Each structure stands twice: as structure tokens, then as C-alpha cells.
Amino acid sequence: MPGEKNINTWIQLSGKFNFHENIKEVFDKTGFVYAPFHRETNFPIIFFEPELIFENEDFDENLIEEISSKPPLYPEYNFETPFEIKKADYLDQAKSYINSFDGNFQKAVLSRVQIENRLEGFNVGGFFMDLQKSYPNAYCHLINIPGTGTWAGATPETLLRINKNT
């Protein structure tokens, strides 16, 4: 979560993600929700349930080697590749958001999809560590969703936290 200093590694060995129509279906579960701002059939709500959880560097190197050597498991779902939003379009959207505020909104979230080809010698772990250093107070995440790619992000605030008791 934003502001936390621990790095948690969650691994789901099965390769099967749970797809949901409604976010309320996962309220009583422990896991990670990956969902678009506007849910559509070609971009479902994905719920990731970890089978292994490590905190900081508290993991077995042999286990990581074993997991890494296994062939990838892909869910039985075909994702469409998201479209990239060009910087000029993003800035136009931002101007539109700013002009729309005029007392009508308390908050708006604008995001941008930027598709990058992996550079030769790219190290995803190093990238994640750099992301954390660049945004020390943010919730940083890195997730690989078979069939759709590897996604990274940093958000400066907790968007939603659900406890069974509250």
C-alpha cells in the first residue's frame, strides 16, 4: 500500500485467473484485483489469488528457480491488446478534465496506456526497484498476466481497501 516500505511478492502457480463481472464478487477474498476503469467483455475484472507470498527478500531461491524453469501456463481467455494513447491525446484529455472540474467533480483519474517493446538486457526486477525508488510513497505494482502482458504502475494513494469486518 502507499507509504509501506515492504516489498511483497505474490505468486499464483496455477496460471488460472478468476474473471468476474462485478467487483463485489471478490470483496471477501484475499488477493489482487486488476480491472479496467470501464469494464467490458474484452477487458474483464481479473482476480489474482496468490498461492505463495513472500515479504521483502524472505523467499527460497531454489523455489524461485523451480518456478522460473516451468513452462508458462495461460488462462483460457483471449485478451485484445489495449490501444496506446498518444501523448498529445492524453494532454487533450487532461485539458478537457481540467475544464470540466468547474466545481462539478471532487476528483478525476486519468490514465494512459503506453506500449513499450522490451529492450535487450531489460531486467524486470531492476525496473521494479527503480520504480519504487522513483515513487517511494506510492503503491508500486508489477504483474504478469499470461496472454495480455506485464503491467507496471505506481499510484500515490489507496484507491480501495476492504476488510471483512468493515
Image (spheres, rainbow, N blue to C red):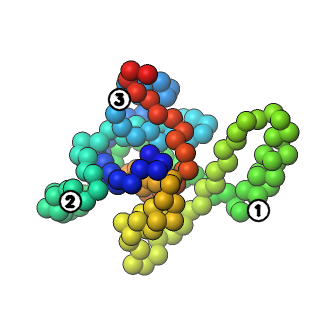
Three-letter residue code for mark 3 = Lys
Which structural element holds mark 2?
helix
Q: Earlier in the sequence, mark 2 or mark 3?
A: 3
Which structural element holds mark 3?
loop
Q: Earlier in the sequence, mark 3 or mark 1?
A: 3
Q: Residue furthest bottom?
A: 120
Quadrant occupied by the C terminus: top left
Few, some or many C-alpha atoms within 10 Å of disc 2 (few <14, some 14-19, many ≥20)? few
**Badge number at residue 88:** 1
**Which x, y percent locates residue 126?**
39, 70
Residue shown at 81% from the left, 33% from the top: 104
**Which x, y percent locates residue 137?**
50, 54
Asked whether 83 or 78 is in front, the reply is 83
Question: Image height check: is 144 above or below 100?
Answer: below
Asked whether 82 or 76 is in front, the reply is 82
- Give the spatial CA distance, label 2 vs label 3: 25 Å
Residue shown at 54% from the left, 39% from the top: 159
Q: Quadrant of residue 12?
A: top left
Judged by depth in the image, the label closer to the viewer, 3 or 1, is: 3
**Badge number at residue 108:** none
Question: Image height check: is 85 above or below 45?
Answer: below
> Does the rendering let one see residue 105?
yes
- Give the spatial CA distance, label 2 vs label 1: 41 Å
Q: Earlier in the sequence, mark 2 or mark 1?
A: 2
**Badge number at residue 64:** 2
Residue shown at 57% from the left, 35% from the top: 39
| Residue under numbered circle 3 | 29
